[in-house]
Amino acid sequence: MKQINPFPFAADEKRYHTWNYHLRNHFGHKVFKVALDGGFDCPNRDGTAAYGGCTFCSAAGSGDFAGNRAEDLVTQFNQIKDKMHEKWKNGKYMAYFQAYTNTHAPVEVLREKFESVLKLDGVVGLSIATRPDCLPDDVVQYLAELNKRTYLWVELGLQTVHERTALLINRAHDYECYKEGVEKLRKHNIRVCSHIINGLPLESNEMMMETARAVSKLDVQGIKIHLLHLLKGTPMVKQFEKGKVEFLTKEDYVSLVCDQLEILPPEMIVHRITGDGPIDLMIGPMWSVNKWDVLNSIDAELKARGSYQGKYFQKEQVIAE
């Protein structure tokens, strides 16, 4: 009797549905992201929603590895693309608008910026990072138009479902706003990737699992699982100094991520599974800088458990109902 593969999206010994596997399967060849800074601001910094930004967010608007905003987008694209080709000789590109809030501008501004990179040679799609409170109807309509003529993802920062934590990190929108944002995009079949962060101030292991459970029930097609890393110059440094931030150990993080993967739908695409920052800005946890060690440890833990993404998904759904 032919055995059924319990993790059908696995590749390269992975037991979860990786972003790399998905892109290769979708396009038939290597595709990598080219991270850009579109020169946008954030409603959580300019007073539209709040001031100061999320406490974990860097001065680069979480675009520390994106292009230089002093350069035009085409120059940024070519510079980052060339660096990526030092690792991958061949491949096509996803233009990734990463820094700050990339729908926080009038539609005509968005159109000018997005179209300028879409027409570049080898660009097969767009990934746009934004907030759920920056999706007015006219912007969503433009995104729906883009979705019909290119491969589009919209990445929404959730971070946590817990309102107490949201206040601590100055997120400046609630979970209901997040769900409404997802609904707006999904009405047009736009792919959504939810960002969550493990290790936020005063969150317990169970609270982080609750966030993963909530995402597993949303109509989202992808997830980014981040490790909280503290950078110099961020507002969270003050919380760290007051004892409100305690770094996860590598062992605890690996175990937690595996627990989270087990309850996610097997078809949900895992765009990212850890997080790191510029080493010269890092306060901690310093083990996160060795990204490949973290990834390999997650692979090893899943294998040791005999586990994989989605193993307990149906069980979780039954419990929820």
Image (spheres, grey):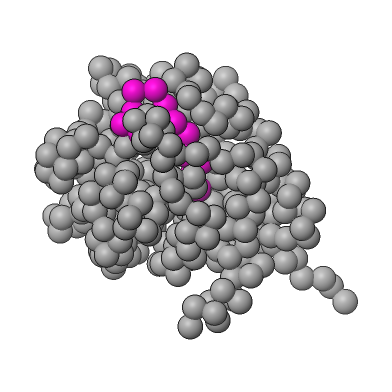
| Most distant residue in the front direction | 242
Q: From what the image shows, is residue 38 above or below residue 44?
A: above
Judge left or right: residue 172 versus residue 300.
left
Magenta-drawn stretch contains 210: no
Judge left or right: residue 99 versus residue 25.
left
In the foreground, 293 or 237? 237
Judge left or right: residue 117 versus residue 265.
left
In the foreground, 70 or 179? 179
* Extent of the magenta region: 225-236
Query: Residue drawn at (57%, 27%), measured in percent from left and top?
Result: 286
**Quarter-of-image position of residue 201:** top left
Using the rendered image of the protein, determine whether residue 109 is visible from the camera's viewpoint.
Answer: no
Q: From what the image shows, is residue 244 above or below residue 220?
A: above
Query: Residue drawn at (82%, 71%), measured in percent from left and top?
Result: 3
Magenta-drawn stretch contains 234: yes
Q: Position of residue 108 (x, y in %)?
A: 12, 41
Q: Position of residue 255 (x, y in %)?
A: 65, 51
Label tally: 0
Which quadrant: the N terminus?
bottom right
Q: From what the image shows, is residue 291 above or below residue 300?
A: above
Q: Position of residue 149 (x, y in %)?
A: 32, 52
Query: Residue drawn at (57%, 20%), measured in percent from left and top?
Result: 86
**Quarter-of-image position of residue 77:** top left
**Quarter-of-image position of residue 163:** bottom left
Q: Position of residue 195 (x, y in %)?
A: 42, 49
In the foreground, 135 or 83? 135
Judge left or right: residue 7 versus residue 277.
right
Using the rendered image of the protein, determine whether residue 274 is visible from the camera's viewpoint.
Answer: yes
